[in-house]
Image (cartoon, grey):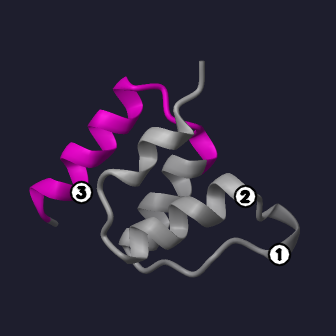
Amino acid sequence: MNDIYYETLDKMEKANVSREYVVGWASGYLQNPKREEQRLNEAYEAGYSDGEEKATDNWKQWVEK
């Protein structure tokens, strides 16, 4: 595992990013299979897609207030 994975997760956790996005991002980054269809949502799918692409800055739009 590389530092980018851990650093990005740490930044997202500290910034209060949507939990669904974080779980999706980590799953996509690690190339895990997607959740079952009834548990998918917009935040998870966006995170999964960004994780697959190894995108480390798109999470900022998913910060919860």
What segment is highlighted magenta in the picture?
2-20
Label 3 sits on a secondary structure element that is helix
Q: Is residue 57 left or right of residue 24?
A: left
Mark before the other along the chain sequence, 3 or 1 = 3
Q: Is residue 15 left or right of residue 32?
A: left
Magenta region includes residue 9 = yes
Label 1 sits on a secondary structure element that is helix
Q: Position of residue 35 (x, y in %)?
A: 69, 71
Instruction: Looking at this view, name the residue that lies furthest to the right.
Output: 38
30 is higher (above) or lower (below) than 2: below
Q: Circle 2 sits on which residue?
A: 42
Q: Is residue 2 left or right of residue 40?
A: left
Q: Amino acid at mark 3?
A: Tyr
64 is higher (above) or lower (below) than 9: above
How far separated are the C-alphas under marks 1 and 2?
12 Å
What residue is rendered at 64% in x and 58% in y? 44
Q: CB of mark 1 within 8 Å of CB of mark 2?
A: no
Q: Which mark is residue 10?
A: none
35 is higher (above) or lower (below) than 9: below
Q: Position of residue 13 (x, y in %)?
A: 40, 32
What residue is rendered at 46% in x and 72% in y? 28
For the C terminus, the image quarter is top right
Q: Amino acid at mark 1?
A: Glu
Label 2 sits on a secondary structure element that is helix
Q: Circle 1 sits on which residue?
A: 37
How far separated are the C-alphas under marks 3 and 1?
26 Å
What residue is rendered at 44% in x and 66% in y? 50
Q: Which mark is residue 5?
A: 3
Q: Amino acid at mark 2?
A: Glu
For the N terminus, the image quarter is bottom left
Circle 1 packing at 10 Å, graded few (<14), some (14-19), many (20+), is: few
